Image (cartoon, rainbow, N blue to C red):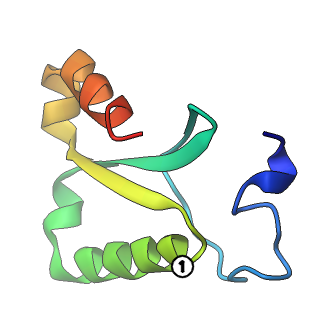
Amino acid sequence: MDLNDLPISNSDKKSKERVEIDFLVFYKQKCMILEVDGEHHQQASQRTRDYRRDRVLLRDGIQTVRFNASECYNHPLEVVTEFLNLF
């Protein structure tokens, strides 16, 4: 697989909306986003932005997986294992 095969590379057919992500992970010839959500993600306005952004990325073929920040800090190996098992 090369970068031209990824859903994010064909900008003329994909969303023009700009988004910020925590981690874009390439594994087993696929890509997914890993998001680490801190306390500010509990605010309704931030959740709304997060959900909207997740939908924009999903339309472009990229799934977002969210983990709580404390879970990532306290159990990083478990988080990575769980995330990679989703591929």
Q: Position of residue 74 (x, y in %)?
A: 13, 22
Q: Position of residue 73 (x, y in %)?
A: 21, 26
Q: Position of residue 51 (x, y in %)?
A: 32, 77
Query: Which quadrant would the C terminus be assigned to in this image?
Result: top left
Q: Nearer the viewer, residue 18 or 9?
A: 9
Q: Nearer the viewer, residue 68 or 79?
A: 79
Asked whether, in this view, residue 71 is left or right of residue 82, the answer is left
Q: Is residue 37 visible?
A: no
Residue type (three-letter) at the residue carrying disc 1: Arg
Query: Which quadrant would the N terminus be assigned to in this image?
Result: top right
Rate crowding at label 1 as few (under 14), some (14 to 19) or many (20 or more) other CA atoms within 10 Å.
Answer: few
Mark 1 — residue? 59
The residue under the point 14% across, 35% down is 70
Q: Is residue 63 above or below residue 85?
A: below
The residue under the point 69% across, 62% down is 7
Q: Nearer the viewer, residue 60 or 51?
A: 60
Picture quarter containing residue 26? top right
Asked whether, in this view, residue 42 is left or right of residue 9, the answer is left
Q: Is residue 61 visible?
A: yes
Q: Residue at the top extreme? A: 77
Picture quarter containing residue 71? top left
Picture quarter containing residue 14? bottom right
| Badge 1 element | helix
Q: Is residue 66 above or below residue 25?
A: below
